[in-house]
Amino acid sequence: QKEVEQNSGPLSVPEGAIASLNCTYSDRGSQSFFWYRQYSGKSPELIMFIYSNGDKEDGRFTAQLNKASQYVSLLIRDSQPSDSATYLCAVNGYGNNRLAFGKGNQVVVIP
Amino acid sequence: EPEVTQTPSHQVTQMGQEVILRCVPISNHLYFYWYRQILGQKVEFLVSFYNNEISEKSEIFDDQFSVERPDGSNFTLKIRSTKLEDSAMYFCASSPRTGTDTQYFGPGTRLTVL
């Protein structure tokens, strides 16, 4: 049973600051890692994916993966009020199709 | 940009009734999925579907659930005899291939069982 943990409570950040979100996963065989954004009552929307150890940047978002520590993170730079949402970490493994999701981290950007 | 679409957006049904949730995956995608999210809880995998058959299913996907691709575009989830605990958002997703591919989600169907 794959477990994905996102343990931080709601994160409040001032507009323009950096929001940092963390996720750990239990299945060492996990191959691909995703961050989705979910607004209240809406569906998950892909923000980023990462497959290899290290950093991956896309605009204001940076994903970081450390497979040895089974840890993936997301940084949101220059946070905007529109970034206020729940961020879901999702993981899947080699040879299977299911995404295992964490509970999500709520981010509130304060203008 | 191609999107996954789902109908209806909201379905209200009586306990014990059958419901069919419909999805149109992105046209050149090969793998299709159903997930559900009970209010306030994690998104949970139900089933994946490839080449007209189930490729993987979770322990949630018991005999009351079935999936079908009745034609070249639609992908359906049927719940045979709904229970109160089936009330949730149901999301369809599709991906170009499998395994590590990104899954793109539809807007969801909110199912309310009374």
Image: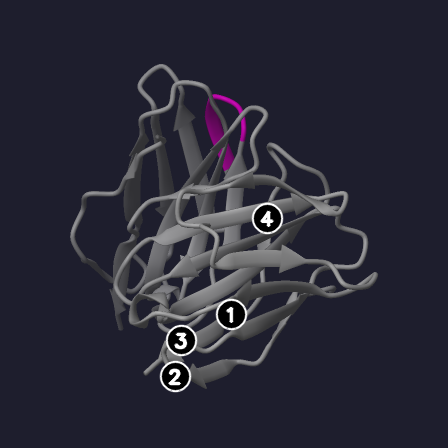
Q: Which is more foreground, mark 1 or mark 4?
A: 1
Would you name the residue on which mark 3 appears?
A: B16
Residue B108 badge: 1
Task: Tell me the residue that label 4 is attached to.
Answer: B103
Q: Please tell me how crowded label 1 is: few (under 14), some (14-19), or many (20+) other residues with Cα within 10 Å.
A: many
Circles 2 and 1: CB atoms closer than 8 Å: no
Mark 1–mark 3 Cα distance, whole angstroms, equals 22 Å
First in sequence: mark 1 vs mark 3? 3
Please tell me whether mark 3 sits on a helix, a strand or a loop: loop
Q: Residues within 10 Å of mark 4 (few under 14, many from 20)?
A: many
Label 1–label 4 contact, CB within 8 A: no
In the rendered structure, does residue B41 fall within the stretch colored magenta? no
Give the mark nearer the N terminus: 3 vs 4: 3
Are dots 4 and 2 in contact, CB under 8 Å? no
Q: Earlier in the sequence, mark 2 or mark 1?
A: 2
- Residue at 53% across / 23% down in the picture? A52
Taking the spot 38% from the left edge, 79% from the top edge, the residue there is B112
Image quadrant containing the C terminus of chain B: bottom left
Q: Residue at x 45, y 41 (%)?
A: A62
Across and down, in percent, residue A40 comes to: 35, 72
Residue type of the residue flagged with mark 3: Gly
Whether residue A45 is visible, yes or no, is no
**Quarter residue A2 falls in:** top left
10 Å crowding of disc 3: few (<14), some (14-19), many (20+): some
Q: As shown in the figure, which amino acid type bears the numbered disc 2? A: Gln
Which is nearer the N-term, disc 4 or disc 2? 2
Cα–Cα span, label 2 and label 1: 20 Å
Vertical comparison of B10 with B36: above or below? below
Instruction: Identify the subunit bearing mark 4.
Output: B
The range drawn in magenta is A51-56
Residue placed under numbered mark 2 in the picture: B14
- Give me the chain letter of mark 1: B
